[in-house]
């Protein structure tokens, strides 16, 4: 059934409770990627989904397997990633205790970190829930789903799955939504557009619209790359700069598209707008989540952009490209001063990476700096665990990305501490022969936490841990390892890693710059 619905890769770990899910998997023509931990399997499914645009599917066992994947489930939920987790479950838990992998309420536990979690007690119910999940991924805001199937049902004979339902028709933007946004843009003298991850599918149209009307723009971290470097009115991904409200306050119209304007986007409560605010989103919950919202447009962002582009709109000339450039330069200098030594390394990598490189980053200072200063040449090509903020995301997610984009460059960025959450997935990357460069930023401590403690006037403690010899560890797994001593050597190591026969750990320290 999964194969007939377009699933070609499943990430997971077999166990005695879910082994029946593996019967016939090769005959169906599905590739299974063996993770070393269910957390890794979940992040791989997440990375695959972000890279391919198709749902990422993971198989796990009852109890601890489901618990281990709940962190990736929460990450995919918060970042609107279509991940389907299918687990086994015990046949009965009320009258009998002490069973292997038993939980008090496995279905309910999963529900805390996903859109919905249901038990399919028959084959027919499993088929129906899978089709429901896939339809909702395609038609609404995509978020994690969980289906559990009792062991006895997995072991039973079953009728074949029904034929795949007809694909959903492409949605057009409502005429009223197009008219509202177009009229607002006509009336604006100084429009500003903020583009989030929900606008990636309509990136070309939004970039053209911003250029045509002379609007300034910001992108969230998830939206980076939507507006090209050549746009001289683009403020980039500096939305969270403390004084960005002064820029936003200059606009008489702010159009926020496909973004939650969440804490992770702004690092403040209020956006800072003084003019009219129009929110565009596929999720109705988001339309009134920001105080001071004047209009909420429940609409597909790509369809709306195409509709508005067809309208007769006149360009304004209220924003100064010179002022935008000066503000961006000042914000980059602030970023460099806050976390010294990273900007030169980020700029060096930005200069040599192929335009179609897809990047997966972890919760590390290297990524925090890079996500602000680095302008991606293509949208939807930098993936970061923004919402849930999980450690250990980058490498397994990049493995999933490699599986979705075979032959195309993929890179991971991790910190010395977070890397150790899922370092065992190096084994999976070696096993698969993936040409994956893994930038490991080692500043010898939990530097972001240390800095936060100092700002809070707390004597830093528990921020320094003994690290292994990372290069030796990588080689022990069978991976390549490099420790470049200069920026030029770093650039060479990364480009060489894209051509290697297996992953390459590239060890970078503050001394590298």
Image (tube, helix red, strand yellow):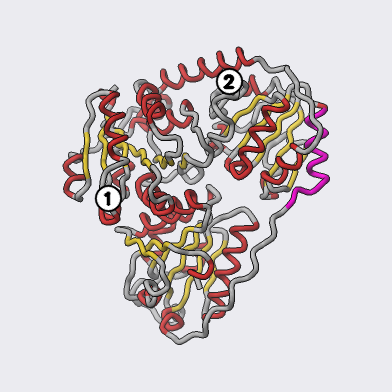
Q: Which residues are magenta?
A: 172-186
Q: Front-most of 12 and 228?
A: 228
List the single residue furthest toward the bottom.
Answer: 157
Dot 2 or dot 1, earlier in sequence: 2
Q: Quadrant of residue 500?
A: top left
Q: Residue at x 26, y 32 (%)?
A: 444
Residue 163 location, x and y as percent? 59, 76
Residue labelled with disc 1: 426
Q: Quadrant of residue 97?
A: bottom left
> Is residue 171 located in the magenta-colored stretch of the structure?
no
Q: Front-most of 150 and 477?
A: 477
Q: Front-most of 344 and 334?
A: 344
State whether the magenta stretch is mostly helix, strand or loop: helix
Q: Nearer the viewer, mark 2 or mark 1?
A: 1
Q: Quadrant of the C terminus?
A: top left
Residue labelled with disc 2: 243
Please determine whether, in this image, residue 302 is positioned above or below residue 106.
above
Please report contact status of discs 2 and 1: CB closer than 8 Å, yes or no: no
Calculate the distance from the C-alpha at mark 2 to the C-alpha at mark 1.
Answer: 41 Å
Q: Residue at x 47, y 75 (%)?
A: 149
Q: Front-most of 456 and 374?
A: 374
Q: Is residue 258 left or right of residue 151?
A: right
Please determine whether, in this image, residue 508 is positioned above or below residue 30.
above
Residue 122 location, x and y as percent? 52, 81
Q: Is residue 332 left or right of residue 471?
A: right
> Is residue 177 located in the magenta-colored stretch of the structure?
yes
Please determine whether, in this image, residue 89 is positioned above or below residue 344.
below
Does residue 468 appear anywhere in the picture? Answer: yes
């Amino acid at each position: 059934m999964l194969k007939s619905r377009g699933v070609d890769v499943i990430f997971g770990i077999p166990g005695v409770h879910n082994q029946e899910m593996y019967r016939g998997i090769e005959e169906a023509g599905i590739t299974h990627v063996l993770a070393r931990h269910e957390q890794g399997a979940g992040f791989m499914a997440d990375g695959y989904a972000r890279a391919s645009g198709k749902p990422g599917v993971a198989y796990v066992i009852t109890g601890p397997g489901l618990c281990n994947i709940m962190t990736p489930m929460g990450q995919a939920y918060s970042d609107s990633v279509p991940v389907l987790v299918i687990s086994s479950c015990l046949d009965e838990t009320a009258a009998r205790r002490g069973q292997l992998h038993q939980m008090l309420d496995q279905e309910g536990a999963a529900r805390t970190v996903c859109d919905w979690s249901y038990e399919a007690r028959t084959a027919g119910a499993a088929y129906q829930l899978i089709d429901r999940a896939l339809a909702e991924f395609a038609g609404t805001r995509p978020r994690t789903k969980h289906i559990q199937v009792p062991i006895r049902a997995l072991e039973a004979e079953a009728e074949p799955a029904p034929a795949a339902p007809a694909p959903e028709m492409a949605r057009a933007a409502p005429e009223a939504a197009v008219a509202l946004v177009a009229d607002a843009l006509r009336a604006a003298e100084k429009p500003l557009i903020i583009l989030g991850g929900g606008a990636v599918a309509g990136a070309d149209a939004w970039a053209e619209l911003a250029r045509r009307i002379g609007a300034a723009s910001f992108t969230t971290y998830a939206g980076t790359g939507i507006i090209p470097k050549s746009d001289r009115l683009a403020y980039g991904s500096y939305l969270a700069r403390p004084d960005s409200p002064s820029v936003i306050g200059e606009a008489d119209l702010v159009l926020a598209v496909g973004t939650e304007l969440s804490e992770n986007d702004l690092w403040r409560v209020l956006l800072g707008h003084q003019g009219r605010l129009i929110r565009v989103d596929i999720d109705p919950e988001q339309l009134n989540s920001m105080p001071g919202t004047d209009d909420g447009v429940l609409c597909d962002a790509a369809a709306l952009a195409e509709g508005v582009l067809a309208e007769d709109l006149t360009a304004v000339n209220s924003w100064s490209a010179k002022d935008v450039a000066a503000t961006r330069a000042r914000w980059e200098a602030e970023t460099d001063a806050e976390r010294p030594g990273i900007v030169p390394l980020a700029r060096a990598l930005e200069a040599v990476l192929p335009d179609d490189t897809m990047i997966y980053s972890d919760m590390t200072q290297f990524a925090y700096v890079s996500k602000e200063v680095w302008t991606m040449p293509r949208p939807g090509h930098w993936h970061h665990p923004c919402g849930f903020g999980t450690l250990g995301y980058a490498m397994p997610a990049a493995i999933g990305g490699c599986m979705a984009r075979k032959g195309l460059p993929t890179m991971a960025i991790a910190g010395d501490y977070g890397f150790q959450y899922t370092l065992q997935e190096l084994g999976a990357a070696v096993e698969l022969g993936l040409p994956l460069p893994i930038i490991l930023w080692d500043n010898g401590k939990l530097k972001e936490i240390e800095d936060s403690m100092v700002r809070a006037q707390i004597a830093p403690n528990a921020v320094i841990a003994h690290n292994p010899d990372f290069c030796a560890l990588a080689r022990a797994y069978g991976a390549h390892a490099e420790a470049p001593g200069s920026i030029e050597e770093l650039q060479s190591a990364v480009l060489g890693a894209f051509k290697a026969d297996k992953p390459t750990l590239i060890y970078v320290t503050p001394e590298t710059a």
